[in-house]
Image (cartoon, rainbow, N blue to C red):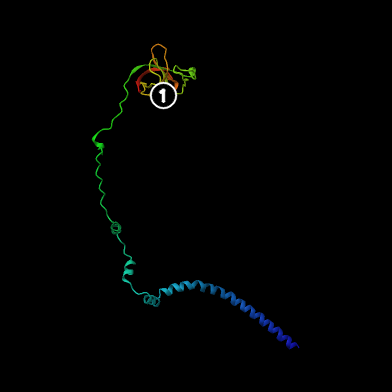
Amino acid sequence: MQSWLYLIRNSRLSSLAMDGIISDLRRAALPVLALGLFALPLAGAGAQDAPGQRALVADLVPANAAVEALLTDEIVPQGEIEADFEASFATFDDPSLPAPGPRAVDLDSFDPPVEAEPAVWRSGVASYYGARFNGRRTASGERFDMNALTAAHKTLPFGTKVRVTNPRTGKSVVVRINDRGPYAHGREIDVSRAAAIELGLIQRGHGNVELALLD
């Protein structure tokens, strides 16, 4: 009975020892296996450059002079590339201009007309009127608007357009006659406040002007 117990105990110990050895072998084999997996691509790349592999590729793919010429490492000059590019396009002569028609006019044969400045009709002193008369009836019947480009004159017909120029500054404005005046001695025309601003008369209140009739 004791001998049987001894055999069973020894067999169990042998089994445990075997399991330990297998585990050690597995742990040792894993790094070797990983190293082999990484080495396979390198080995394949080296095999492709091997002399026998080159001969096999040469037998499978016949030599082609045209293909080899295209795969050359020669550097093509830039001038030749541009010449080939220019030659790939057809050249055309410049199209001729159509003949002028019977009613065509040569623009270089005459000078365009230049609109002449209206002649100075009269010169005198201009003043202005504004907020005090704003909204009142004018002699023409319409209400005075100090922000509109209008003026009062003693004799010019209503609706007449007059270019008023300040010769001191060169500024000018076109006003429409819609009222009568001015009644102050020595004044030629009364302009609205908006026209006086354009002429630069606000600060002094009056100034010498030149009048030119537009229509």
Q: Quadrant of residue 62?
A: bottom left
Which quadrant holds the C terminus?
Answer: top left
Looking at the image, which residue is at 59% across and 74% down? Answer: 27
Farthest residue, direction right: 1
Is residue 199 shown to the viewer in this render?
no
Q: Position of residue 5 (x, y in %)?
A: 73, 85
Under tag 1, what secondary structure?
helix
- Most extreme residue toward the top is 185
Viewer-side residue, 129 vs 98: 98
Q: Nearer the viewer, residue 143 or 45?
A: 143
In the figure, 2 relative to 173: above or below?
Answer: below
Amino acid carrying mark 1 in the image:
Glu
Residue 49 to residue 96: above or below: below
The residue labelled by disc 1 is 198
In this figure, what is the number of numbered marks?
1
Locate residue 21, reporting x and y percent.
Answer: 62, 79
Q: Is 4 displayed left or right of 142 in the figure?
A: right
Relative to residue 30, is residue 12 drawn left or right? right
- Which x, y percent locates residue 125? 38, 16
Quadrant where the image shows the N terminus? bottom right
Crowdedness near tag 1: few (<14), some (14–19) or many (≥20) residues, C-alpha within 10 Å: some
Q: Quadrant of residue 157?
A: top left
Horizontal side of residue 182 vs 120, given as left or right: right
Q: Is 181 left, or right, of 17 in this rendering?
A: left
Is residue 204 placed above or below 63 in the rendered structure? above
Q: Residue at x 23, y 35 (%)?
A: 109
